[in-house]
Amino acid sequence: MNRQAISNLFANPFVKWGLGAVLVLFMAVLPLLNINIPGVLPGPTYTPGSLQLIAFAMLIASLALSYHLIFGVAGLLSFGHALYFAAGAYGLGIALRHLQLELVPAIVFTLALGLIIAGAVGALSLRATGIGFAMVTLAFAQAGSVLVRRNPGGLTNGDEGLGLATANVPDFLIGVINTKNLYWMCLVVLVIVFLITTWFEKSRAGHVVAATRENIGRVRVIGIRPYFVQLLTFVISGVLATLVGMAYMLLQSSATQKVITAEFTLSLLVIVVLGGVGYRWGAVIGGIVYTFLDQRLTALAGSEAIANLPDILRIPLSEPLFILGTLFILVVLFLPGGISGVALRLARGKTGLAKERQTLEELA
Amino acid sequence: MSTVILLLITGLGLGALYFLVASGLSLIYGLMDVLNFAHGAFLTLGAFAGYEFAKAIGGASWGTFLISILIGAIVGALFATLTELLLIRKLYERLIEQVLVTVGLSLAAVALFEGIWGQDPLYTTGPSWLNQTTNVLGATIPNDRFIYIIAAVLVLLAIVAFLKFTRYGLIIRAGVENRSMVTALGIDVRTAFTIVFAIGGAAAGIGGVLASHYYGSVTPYLGGSLLIFAFIVTVIGGLGSLAGAAIASGLVAVLQQFANYYFGLGDLIVVLLLAAVLLLRPSGLLGSKKA
């Protein structure tokens, strides 16, 4: 088969969704299999350590998908996405510990909280455009970060982080022995977020918001107010982040103020760009690759081979974020389509690069 | 009354630090439309350079202090110039990618600083006069605050003089006003871009050394924490406006001090102020319509 035929085959929706379903099925049975990937996973796939890592990667991928919605689809550069994720993690933690709610009411409560916060921040910040928008979202996230650290009323536990109160959480979601249940939960979250993102992108509102990214003036001219559809995207993206935040709380059993820092949002930006701006699969792959790189580079940093190197090599190599940051700069400079851009270029031939530059520039 | 004066002067001292960071951010954004996330890294490296120099000399004299500020400025300017030449220059006219590159640089630089200097605070020593206090109208003011204010005023005057009385200053002012017109007149603005980065880096380096005395220590995260406030100051003052950055620095920092003292909510007040300014006057206090 030549390239054209392959790319046509992948364009067929049945083939595409079929492959997706097979992949999800494979991920679902992974905890029952004994697959060893030395250097990538800490142990065979059925061990809690590996499952925990894969589940975490899937959550980061889901979060990146929600960020893709606001950055890649709507073209809004938000620096405050960590706020809604933290609202999920801390909201669920507080609902379980301080409000003593059962798990399901606690989840509903947290989703409502995320909806309110995203709605309020979105309604305010969307009145500014471009860099102004970025700054307002950053400022609100910063305010959230200050609140969490200040520990109002003993709710957030400040710098120490909020642990998960397990009294009202069903037993099958607690403990190392049940990691595979948590793993399945994270897989479900990823699938839900992916489906909602896809559905939204293909809906009328999704098309309109993509149009506001391409040419906001033209959208106004045909009589649509961009504000509401942008707000809708902002809120959906925020609530999805809240959902992922709750799963994070259950998986990690605690939330620290790290999840609401500006750096955390920046790492999401890095993930989406690394995976390829504008591609759903890019966000997923970027999230997974980033998590594993981060994990493995940290392990590498502590290894003997690095410790014995001279300082000038040892210091940069023992800092995962240095390597990821440098990698990110190189991707921006030389591979503007990220991972999915490279993959598509291999499939389509040479025409890719100009188009990817254009995709990034449309965001400006 | 003495409390009010104390809060006012310490607020201005903090505002001076904000201004040293925000002036460069504002100039860079005004001329090039680049929101420079790496600015905090310039500041941190300047602070570490000043710290290393003071440690190597081993003295706490005025001479050491002043030279360490100078070294901070030079290191900051060099780092900024290299950033412009190696990273930003390749991406002219590609605004989002420029922002992304500075984001990547700030992440990588902070990680590298952690690797070199560790995560723990390194304590600075300065002339002992800095740690004493002066009585102003009944208020006991820490002396170092005066140094910050003087430094910020000197930097402001130097930048204004540069912009007003030199040829490149003229090009930069014209470029902030209308870059395509300057280019159309056949003037190469790229040198001006590099100069603006160097100036911003130098101011940030000075700010870094002073901030390390303000907080009493240097950490790899020094720049990041100041940068967010500097961003807010820049937006409130009006992106691209030096005078706006100066006024907003003072305003934000004084407000922050008062709110911290009376309600303990300084950081939140600043955020609310930003939201209010953006909603009522989206281009900032002294910003042009462009932003």
Image: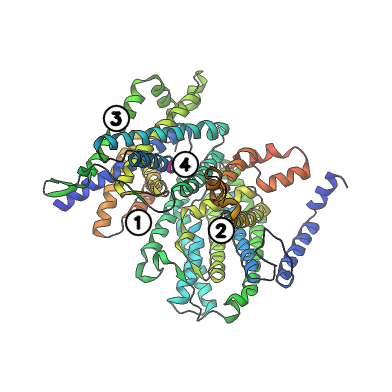
Q: Quick one: SS at disc 3? A: helix
Q: CA distance from mark 2 to mark 4?
A: 27 Å
Which chain letter goes with mark 2? A
Q: Nearer the viewer, mark 2 or mark 3?
A: 3
How far across and down, in percent of the image, does residue B260 sit? 27, 56
Q: Which mark is residue B268?
A: 1
User: What secondary structure do most residues of the magenta stretch adopt?
Assistant: loop
Q: Nearer the viewer, mark 2 or mark 4?
A: 4
Residue B237 x, y percent position in the rendering:
35, 40
Q: Amino acid at mark 2?
A: Ser
Give the secondary structure at mark 1: helix
Q: Give me the disc on residue A237.
A: 2
- In this view, the mark in front (3 or 1): 3
Horizontal side of B35 relative to B229 (left or right) equals right
Query: Mark 3 to mark 1: distance in Å?
Result: 31 Å
Q: Chain of mark 4?
A: B
Please state, as top left, top right, bottom left or bottom right, where the C terminus of chain A lies in the image: top right
Q: How many numbered tags mark residues here? A: 4
Residue A232 is inside the magenta segment = no
Residue B77, visible in the rendered structure? yes
Q: Is residue B148 left or right of residue B284?
A: left
Q: CA distance from mark 2 to mark 3?
A: 46 Å
Q: Are marks 3 and 4 on the same chain?
A: yes
Amino acid beneath label 4: Ala
Q: Report the disc number at residue B252.
A: none
Question: In the image, which is nearer the foreground, mark 3 or mark 4?
Answer: 4
Q: How far separated are the C-alphas under marks 3 and 4?
A: 25 Å
Q: Quadrant of residue A40?
A: bottom right
Residue under disc 2 on the same chain as residue under disc 4? no
